[in-house]
């Protein structure tokens, strides 16, 4: 049977520790200090192989210590045998106890890691839109609140976008195709945003939101226009749309900084007003409330 490579190295370490302990005990004769050296390979075995390893190492340590006990006990053979058995039992019991202790500690550590992973997974699920696999409105609210609370002199822009005449699309092709359309739009937004600090989410229904840190009005307009054009270039048919015979989007943008003195709700309201203007002006366009 070929030993697992991951187990071979610990076995070599344990064997080396046993050999060193044996040499030291042989050199300096058994006494209270030298005999305690056998604890090290026992603990090492218990660490790597838990209780079984601790017991085996304890038995080996007891056997290795046996020949030197004749130097400690010379009165009679019975006394020597009893002392040897006691030492075997003590070392093996020590190995079993330490091994079980390490097993409990490791099990507790694994349990804590699994609990943390479950918490992270549940948090991610709570913050992720199940259809598009992007952040949802709950996560967006958290991010926007953090940004508003930590604004420096840098400007931040918010874009709200809506798929034009999406109800007509669903009426024409059905909700499964509507879901596919939402997924494609989400992918297009994601491919347009280049910076790791840019954030976007599904706001609800056919609405999406984009947060652009350190982005002024001009930069926000450029990115919004890029998203609008890329969605149009998907050329997803929407024959009953009153805007174009393919899927288009309308976008409202708002730029703010710490001097704007806007609360989160006010920023959202202003971006939503810009989106309303984009729709009222014919859709398939970008409107910035700050420059409209």
Image (cartoon, rainbow, N blue to C red):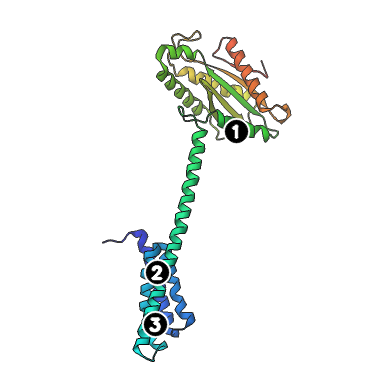
Tell me which corner region of the image, top left, top right, bottom left or bottom right, holds residue 221: top right
Residue farthest to the left, as pictured: 1
Apparent side of residue 219 relative to residue 120 in the rendered image (left or right):
right
Tell me which corner region of the image, top left, top right, bottom left or bottom right, holds residue 254: top right
Which image quadrant: the C terminus?
A: top right
Which image quadrant: the N terminus?
A: bottom left
Q: CA distance from mark 3 to mark 2?
A: 25 Å
For label 2, the crowd category at 10 Å Cα-Cα, with few meaning under 14, some 14 to 19 and many 20 or more, is: many
Residue found 46% across the figure and 22% down from its top: 182
For label 1, the crowd category at 10 Å Cα-Cα, with few meaning under 14, some 14 to 19 and many 20 or more, is: few
Query: Quick one: 289 or 97, which is closer to the camera?
Result: 97
Whether residue 224 appears in this view of the structure is yes
Q: Nearer the viewer, mark 3 or mark 2?
A: 3
Q: Position of residue 220 (x, y in %)?
A: 61, 24
Tell me which corner region of the image, top left, top right, bottom left or bottom right, holds residue 138: top right
Element type at mark 3: helix
What mark, if any, has residue 83 been given in the picture? Answer: 3
Residue found 62% across the figure and 31% down from its top: 144
The residue under label 1 is: 142
Q: Position of residue 26 (x, y in %)?
A: 41, 83
What mark, if any, has residue 14 been given in the picture? Answer: 2
> Which of disc 1 and disc 2 is earlier in sequence?
2
Query: Quick one: 113 or 14, which is closer to the camera?
Result: 113
> Which of disc 1 and disc 3 is earlier in sequence?
3
Element type at mark 1: helix
Q: Nearer the viewer, mark 2 or mark 1?
A: 1
Q: Is residue 143 above or below residue 20?
A: above
Q: CA distance from mark 3 to mark 1?
A: 69 Å
């Amino acid at each position: 049977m070929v030993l697992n490579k991951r187990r071979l190295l610990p076995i070599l370490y344990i064997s080396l520790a046993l050999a060193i302990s044996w040499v030291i005990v042989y050199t300096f004769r058994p006494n209270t200090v030298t005999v305690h050296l056998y604890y090290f390979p026992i603990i090492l075995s218990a660490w790597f192989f838990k209780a079984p390893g601790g017991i085996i190492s304890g038995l080996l340590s007891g056997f290795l210590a046996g020949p030197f006990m004749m130097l400690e006990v010379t009165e009679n053979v019975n006394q020597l045998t009893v002392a040897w058995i006691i030492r075997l039992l003590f070392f093996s019991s020590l190995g079993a106890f330490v091994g079980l202790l390490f097993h409990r500690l490791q099990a507790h550590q694994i349990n804590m890691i699994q609990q943390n992973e479950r918490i992270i997974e549940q948090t991610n699920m709570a913050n992720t839109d199940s259809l598009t696999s992007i952040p949802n409105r709950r996560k967006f609210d958290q991010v926007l609140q953090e940004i508003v609370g930590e604004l420096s002199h840098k400007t931040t822009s918010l874009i709200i976008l809506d798929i034009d005449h999406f109800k007509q699309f669903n009426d024409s092709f059905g909700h499964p195709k509507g879901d596919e359309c939402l997924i494609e739009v989400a992918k297009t937004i994601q491919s347009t945003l280049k910076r790791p600090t840019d954030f976007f989410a599904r706001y609800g229904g056919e609405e999406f939101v984009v947060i652009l840190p350190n982005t002024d009005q001009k930069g926000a307009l450029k990115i919004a226009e890029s998203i609008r054009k890329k969605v149009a270039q998907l050329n997803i048919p929407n024959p009953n749309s009153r805007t174009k015979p393919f899927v288009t989007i309308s976008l409202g943008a708002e730029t703010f900084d710490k001097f704007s003195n806007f609360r989160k709700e006010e920023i959202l309201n202003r971006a939503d007003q810009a989106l309303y203007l984009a729709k009222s002006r014919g859709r398939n366009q970008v409107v910035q409330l700050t420059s409209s």
